[in-house]
Image (spheres, coloured by chain):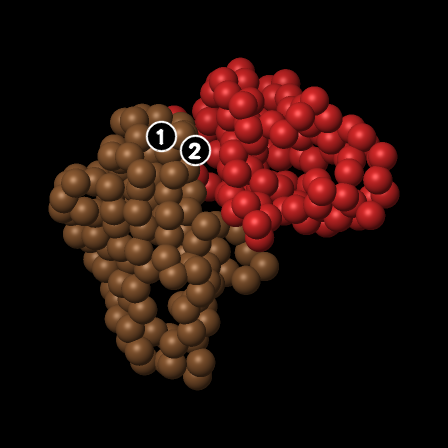
Chain colours: A brown, B red
Amino acid sequence: GQQVMQIPQYQHVQEGEDFTTYCNSSTTLSNIQWYKQRPGGHPVFLIQLVKSGEVKKQKRLTFQFGEAKKNSSLHITATQTTDVGTYFCAGSSGAGSYQLTFGKGTKLSVIP
Amino acid sequence: DAGVIQSPRHEVTEMGQEVTLRCKPISGHNSLFWYRQTMMRGLELLIYFNNNVPIDDSGMPEDRFSAKMPNASFSTLKIQPSEPRDSAVYFCASSFVQGEKLFFGSGTQLSVL
């Protein structure tokens, strides 16, 4: 079945440093979604990427979808303590499919 | 809208007891999901309902798990009998239509002693 690998598993950064998490799928994806889960909280939707090579920005967050639609990344510029949490990617292999395969997530810690 | 509402937030029970988790999806959403989250296995899809009909229950671990959606505004996940390995956070999520972004509830932290 479809597998979505996410690295790194953990990342500790000093406040103000950049952060990147990478997501790789064993199969070509129709779209990829990103979620953020604060400690003790629930996953919250951030963004969905659909097109090959797509790049989207949300303030200090930049999301990319690979040309082959098998990988994606989330980059945070100048991290803040409010960025603390676990970031998950979730891939879907069929347009309109309900089947989202979640990566294990990258847990980000920001040292003030 | 209040979002996806789950109850209880926390459940502590003894092995062998029946556990029932409840979920109220966002009004108007036609897709409902039950996920389980553990450190070892991450987020796993247990069951998916579309328009109140179970479409995919292949993620349900075994016969001890069952889920129902009697109407568009309510779903339950039942574990009978519960076992310590069932300890996890159980999330309910809904989406407006299939394939769209998921809205998660606050989850139920289940501890089976």
- Can you tell which quarter of the image residue B112 is in? top right
Q: Nearer the viewer, mark 2 or mark 1?
A: 1
Local secondary structure at mark 2: strand
At horizontal 52% and vertical 38% (from top left) the residue drawn is: B44
Local secondary structure at mark 1: loop
Location of residue A37 in the rendering, given as x and y in whole percent from the top left corner:
48, 56
Location of residue B32 in the rendering, given as x and y in whole percent from the top left corner:
51, 29
Q: Chain of mark 2?
A: B
Describe residue B54's horizontal placement relative to residue B96 as left or right. Answer: right
Location of residue A41 in the rendering, given as x and y in whole percent from the top left corner:
55, 56
Question: Mark 2 near mark 1, Cβ–Cβ under 8 Å?
Answer: yes
Q: Is residue A82 visible?
A: no
Up-down relation of residue B46 to residue B52 (above or below): below
At horizontal 21% and vertical 47% (from top left) the residue drawn is: A65
* Rendered image: mark on residue A98: none
Location of residue B102 in the rendering, given as x and y in whole percent from the top left corner:
43, 39
Quarter placement of the N terminus of chain A: top left
Q: Is residue A91 visible?
A: yes
Give the residue type at disc 2. Ser
Q: How busy is the neighbourhood of tag 2: few (under 14 within 10 Å), some, or many (20 plus)?
A: many
Q: Which residue is mark 2?
A: B95
Describe residue B74's horizontal placement relative to residue B17 as left or right. Answer: left
- Please give the count of numbered marks on the rendered protein: 2
Give the residue type at disc 1. Gly
- In whole angstroms, how far apart are the C-alphas of marks 2 and 1? 8 Å
Quarter placement of the C terminus of chain A: bottom left
Q: Are marks 2 and 1 on the same chain?
A: yes
Q: Which residue is mark 1?
A: B99
